[in-house]
Structure formats: structure tokens, C-alpha cells
Amino acid sequence: MSTDYDISALPWLHASHELLLNQVRQGSLGHGHLLDVHSQLGGDVLAMSMARLIMCQALTPVGACGQCKACLLVSAGTHPDLHSVAPDGNQIKVDQIRSLCNSLTSTAQQGGKRVAIIYQSERLNTASANALLKTLEEPGKETFVILQTDRPAALLATVKSRCQTLTLTPPNNAEVTAWLKAQQLLPTALDGAKPHDVTWCLSVVGGPIQLAASLQSDKYQTLLNYRKEWALSLRSGHLCGSLLHLKDSQLIDALQVLYLYLRHFVLKSNDINAFTKAQVITLAARIMDMCHKLTTMAAINAQGLCMDYVLAFKKLTHTHR
């Protein structure tokens, strides 16, 4: 998880951290701050680092000192004036926000600043978001509310309008590859072969942090196997390998890999006409739409669904070459 990383280990966050540091030093930091930084890019790490900057009693030119009483309490997870809320299931509930707001109205026990972090704030439901509005409007002296979000579009406009927003430009594939290489996580090429690009599955795993975790487990190899097995299945017209035994919990990953494979197929195929390419892209879009629907659907015949897509692809590419 991203919480296993220090901000110094996530280079794409350094500029944002420096910007926040300057705002804290200049006293220009808003009392409500929205971090539009996905958790897979370390949004939770940046939120906690921001809290450290606010709480620190002896800021250095590069960040929190790490040695003052406030820093030591934050590091130990025992600072009485630092509060946090994370989703309870799929939502952040109104009772969680009411409790948080009540905590922020009490006198700071360390005599300094009070900070609240709301992780994945897009999961605020209507009631909890409305309960937060008064605190955002009138936070009280030396009180700061940090909202981290994976999907800012899902936040109520009334919440967003009361916050300063920091938006992050995600690292490109080359930057992610360099980061993985620095951590010695890239697979070793065998027999002098050129290393393959592991960033092909970034959209499947969710981001660079989860890609790093996947490379340290069997998850990445599973995705690579799906890609190879889809290639065989689409050529042969029948399911191959582990696609014959997919569990419901594996289906979304497998279909997302198929989506990427079809997109790559269209880019690399020179022997099919433009009309067929357009139809394959339409098929890929159908597959991605199904991935979204599967997050809320009950049990489904995984093998039957996969076979439907294989047959649809076979029909398209054999009829319109």
C-alpha cells in the first residue's frame, strides 16, 4: 500500500510537497485543502506529509523536522490534535464526520494546530458532506481540514468550492519505469532478450504503487499470463489456459487485460481494414463497460462471458479482412 512509502520515495510528489511546504511557511495555506491525488499515486502519503508540515514546530527547508514533540507524536500515531477518517465500507458516514467535527471544536491539547485528514473523500455521502460544510466554512482558529480524493468529480460542488485544490500530473510510463528500476523491481531479461515494458498493465492494477506490489507478488505474472492466453484464445477461437477456470473475483482483471490487448491489436494490425478496426474498438468499449457493471453485479458465468467475446472477435476479424 502507499502508506508503506515515505514521500521521499515517491518522486512525482516532490514538487507538490515543496509547494505545500512553502504555503505553510508563508502562512498562505487554506483551512480547507483538497488533494486531487489518487491513493495509487500516494495521495494518502501526501496528505499525511501535509499534516506533518502543519504540525511541525521547527520546519526545515526541506520539510518537517521529525524531531520536535509534535513530529514524534505524529510519527507514533498519538498526536491528540491530528484526526483522520477513512471510508467505512463504501461510504464515509455522517456519524464519522460529526465525530470528527466535534473533535475539531475542542481546544488543541498541544496548544497548537488541529488537523483532520479525510481519505477518499469522494466517498462522503450527501449527509456526511453536508455535515462537513459548516466546519469547512468556519473551521476555527489554526484548524485545517485535508481532503484526499481518488475521484474529485464525485465530490459535491459545495465541498470543492470551499477548498484550495492541489492537482497532480501523474508520472508517465518512462518515469514509472525509472522508479521501478531504482527499487530493483523490474523483471530480469533472460538470454540477452530486451526487457518487456511492465507499465502495459498500469490501468489494470490502478497505478505505480500497486504495480510495484504486483511485481513483488504473483499478481503481475497472473496478468501477463492472461495477456498470453487471450492472444491464444483469440487466434484459436476457444478459451485457453487459466481463462477456462476463471473465478468471479478474477474476471474484471482478465477482461481489463483483454481490453488492453484489443487496443494494442488495432494499433499493430496492418492487415485489417479501417471498418474492422473500428468494430474491434467498439468491442473493446463493450468489454470495459462490462468491467464497470461487474463491480455491482451478482455472480456471472465467467467462462461464458469470455467465450462470447472470443467469438465476437473471431467473427469480426474473419469477416472483414
Image: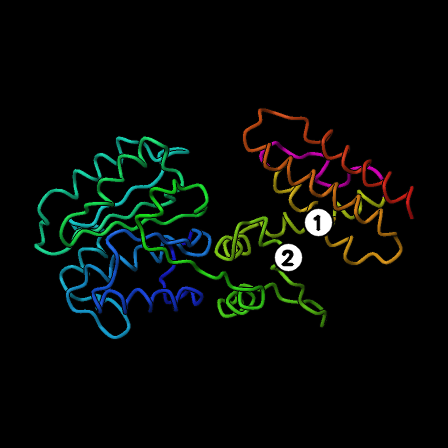
Q: Quadrant of residue 62?
A: bottom left
| Residue identifier under label 1 | 227
Residue 38 in percent (x, y) is at: 44, 52
Q: What stretch of residues is rendered in magenta?
A: 236-250
Look at the numbered disc 1 and give the secondary structure of its residue. helix
Tell me if residue 63 comes above or below residue 277 in the rendering: below
Q: Position of residue 168 (x, y in %)?
A: 44, 60
Determine the residue positioned at 60% across, 25% down.
Answer: 299
Tell me whether the residue at label 1 lies in contact with that at label 2, contact meaning CB atoms closer than 8 angstroms. yes
Q: Position of residue 198 (x, y in %)?
A: 62, 60
Mark 1 neighbour density, 10 Å: few (under 14) some (14–19) many (20 or more) = many
Near mark 2 (Cα within 10 A), the count class, few <14, some 14-19 or many ≥20, is: some
User: Which residue, given by chain and number where applicable, does mark 2 sit on?
Assistant: 200
Please identify, in this view, whether the residue under mark 1 or under mark 2 is nearer the observer.
2
Q: Earlier in the sequence, mark 1 or mark 2?
A: 2
Residue 126 drawn above or below residue 68: above
Residue 242 placement (x, y as % from top left): 70, 40
Location of residue 305 with respect to 240 vertically, above or below:
above
Q: Residue at x 68, y 31 (%)?
A: 302
Is 155 part of what is drawn in magenta? no
Viewer-proximal residue among 136 and 289: 136
Of 255 and 95, the residue lying toward us: 95
